[in-house]
Image: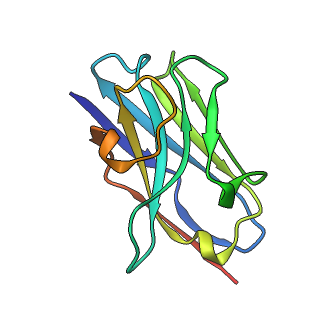
């Protein structure tokens, strides 16, 4: 089992920045692909970004390229999502997820463990 706890959400004006954190505990965190997803009201949960257990390999959805950065610190069992140039359409609950699949995958069904989510609200 892997337990995930997100933090860092909040209310920010358009153009601002937030940094989300996801603290992992339980089974070895190092060998899991980690990802961030988001879900806006009335919409399906969607992929944002993923990072492999091998440092440096990342994959982001086109909607956040150039604005969001995913990173991880295996010594701290933590994954981060730095969000810059935020837009109102980024408003959603953001979820951290862990997958045992080797590779940068974006399907919700490929992730076995999920956090409880943290709300991000971007005002115009």
- Which residue occupies the foreground of this view, 70 or 15? 70
Tell whether 14 sits left or right of 121.
right
Measuring 57% from the left and 39% from the top, which residue is drawn there? 80
The quadrant the C terminus occupies is bottom right
Answer above or below: position of 71 versus 13.
above
- Which residue occupies the foreground of this view, 16 or 57? 57
Q: Residue furthest bottom?
A: 124
Tell whether 30 sits left or right of 15.
left
Tell whether 51 sits left or right of 23.
right
**Snapshot quadrant of residue 1:** top left
Q: How is the image coloured?
A: rainbow
Answer above or below: position of 35 versus 57.
below
Count of number-bearing discs = 0
Residue 108 image offset from top left, x and y in percent? 36, 49
Measuring 27% from the left and 37% from the top, which residue is drawn there? 112
Measuring 63% from the left and 26% from the top, which residue is drawn there? 57
- Which residue occupies the foreground of this view, 45 or 103? 103
Residue 77 image offset from top left, x and y in percent? 45, 24
**Snapshot quadrant of residue 72:** top right
Measuring 62% from the left and 39% from the top, which residue is drawn there? 59
Tell whether 110 sits left or right of 17.
left
Residue 70 image offset from top left, x and y in percent? 62, 39
Residue 68 image offset from top left, x and y in percent? 69, 50
Q: Residue furthest left?
A: 1
């Amino acid at each position: 089992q892997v337990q995930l706890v997100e933090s860092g959400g909040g209310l920010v004006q358009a153009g601002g920045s937030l940094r989300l954190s996801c603290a992992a505990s339980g089974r070895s965190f190092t060998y899991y692909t980690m990802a961030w997803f988001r879900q806006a009201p009335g919409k399906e949960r969607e992929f944002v970004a993923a990072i492999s257990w091998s440092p440096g390999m990342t994959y982001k959805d086109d909607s956040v390229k150039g604005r969001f950065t995913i990173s991880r610190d295996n010594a701290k069992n933590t994954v981060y999502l730095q969000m810059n140039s935020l837009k109102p359409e980024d408003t959603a609950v953001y979820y951290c997820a862990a997958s045992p699949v080797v590779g940068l995958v974006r399907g919700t069904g490929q992730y076995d463990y999920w956090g409880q989510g943290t709300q991000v609200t971007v005002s115009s």
